[in-house]
Amino acid sequence: MRTQTFFKVAVLTGLLALAGCSSKVAAPEQYSGFLKDYSGLQQTTSATGKPTLRWVDPSYNEANYDSILWTPITYYPTPKPTTQIGQKTLDELLNYTNTKMKTAIGTRKPIVTTPGKHSLIFRGAITGVSSQKEGLQFYEVVPVALVVAGTQMATGHRTMDTHLFFEGELIDAATNKPVMKVVRKGEGKDLNNESTPMTFATLKQVVDDMATDATMFDVKKTAK
């Protein structure tokens, strides 16, 4: 009887885990702590049609700013290479993200090295999520969270969904207060199974979409 009860609990836990994984946006328990404040975030749709969590200061007016101080994107927390995602992939992913996002943001305002009175400060990070669910074989990979898709569970072969989590904000250089915050969960290419290594190509499109959205973002369309 005790064994049956344990099995039922394990199955229920697995179903709940899969339900959480189906969410298209990051859940509060998946926030990394990179942003100082996550209040006010609301789900919206990006220019490329991707679900995103975003907060914009109601008084924010892009025309009031003439430049952006670029702070290089980092990993938060610092990742440790694994057999699933090696150091080469981590380095390539970070370098590409910095290049693409800096270029995209540079199309909005000139990039400066010293903030002025009318500057914005950009800071962002590729973040990670711990995934440890009883009854399912999860991989904990920082900064990229791999979650089990739940297919072919009976045979032990599972297709792996991949996600890249990103958090970023724009800060008013004069007041040192955020004017915009974004938390994004991007879906990469599927992996055949838990033994398939992740490569840069697995998540490249996620970064490309983020860069496109940074270029096309229109604050007027977010106003209610």
Image (cartoon, rainbow, N blue to C red):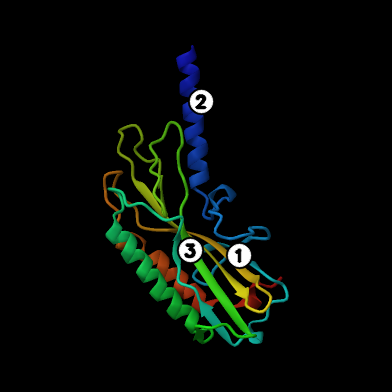
Q: Is residue 72 above or below residue 65?
A: above
Residue at x-position 45% and y-position 71%: 72
User: Disc 2 to disc 3, how far (Cα)?
Assistant: 36 Å
Which of pointers 2 and 3 indicates the residue nearer the eye? Answer: 3
Kindly identify the amino acid type of the residue bearing the numbered disc 1: Arg
> Residue 46 falls in which quadrant of the image?
bottom right
> Residue 155 falls in which quadrant of the image?
top left
Within-10-Å neighbours for mark 2: few <14, some 14–19, many 20+: some
Residue 130 position, x and y percent, is 46, 45
Query: Looking at the rendered structure, which numbered label has been put on residue 123?
Result: none
Residue 136 position, x and y percent, is 41, 35
Question: Considering depth in this image, is 173 or 200 the residue closer to the camera?
Answer: 173
Kindly identify the amino acid type of the residue bearing the numbered disc 3: Ala
Going from N to C along the chain, the mark reached first, 2 or 1, is 2
Residue 197 position, x and y percent, is 27, 51
Label 2 element class? helix
Q: Is residue 202 left or right of residue 182?
A: left
Residue at x-position 36% and y-position 35%: 153
Which residue is under mark 1?
54
Which of pointers 1 and 3 indicates the residue nearer the eye? Answer: 3
Going from N to C along the chain, the mark reached first, 1 or 3, is 1
Kindly identify the amino acid type of the residue bearing the numbered disc 2: Val
Within-10-Å neighbours for mark 1: few <14, some 14–19, many 20+: many
Marks 2 and 3 close (CB-CB < 8 Å): no
Q: Is residue 39 above or below residue 141?
A: below
Query: Looking at the rendered structure, which numbered label has been put on residue 9?
Result: 2
Numbered circles on residues, count: 3
